[in-house]
Image (cartoon, rainbow, N blue to C red):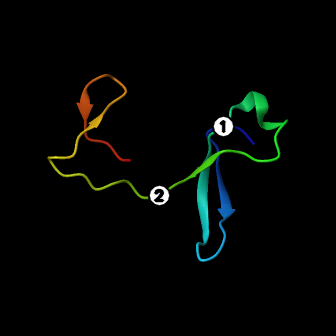
């Protein structure tokens, strides 16, 4: 497993099986019993009043 990989994970009930992205740093993955992951979901629907601060330093419309 490596940071950025997408894997399937079954969450506790009442949730279900979902894809997750691994966030844990590659250097420590082999030393841990648990990893930090984030569920992969659909992009957020944004309107003209919802702006997110982009990585380039300007405001841009993006998915959450």
Residue sitting at x 66%, y 37%: 3
Q: Is residue 30 left or right of residue 13?
A: right
Q: Which residue is mark 1?
A: 3
Mark closest to the chain's N terminus, 2 or 1: 1
Q: Is residue 15 left or right of residue 47?
A: right
- Which of the labelled discs sits on residue 50, or is there none? none
In the rendered image, the residue lying farthest to the bottom is 14
Residue sitting at x 52%, y 54%: 40
Q: Secondary structure at mark 2?
A: loop
x then y, percent, for residue 53: 30, 32
In the rendered image, the residue lying farthest to the top is 57
x then y, percent, for residue 27: 76, 27
Q: Which residue is mark 2?
A: 41
Q: Is residue 26 above or below residue 45?
A: above
x then y, percent, for residue 28: 77, 31
Q: Nearer the viewer, residue 59 or 13?
A: 13
């Amino acid at each position: 497993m490596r940071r950025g990989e997408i894997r399937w994970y079954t969450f506790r009930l009442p949730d279900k099986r979902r894809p997750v992205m691994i966030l844990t740093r590659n250097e420590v993955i082999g030393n841990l019993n648990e990893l930090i992951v984030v569920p992969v979901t659909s992009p957020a629907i944004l309107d003209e009043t919802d702006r997110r601060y982009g990585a380039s330093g300007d405001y841009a419309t993006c998915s959450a």
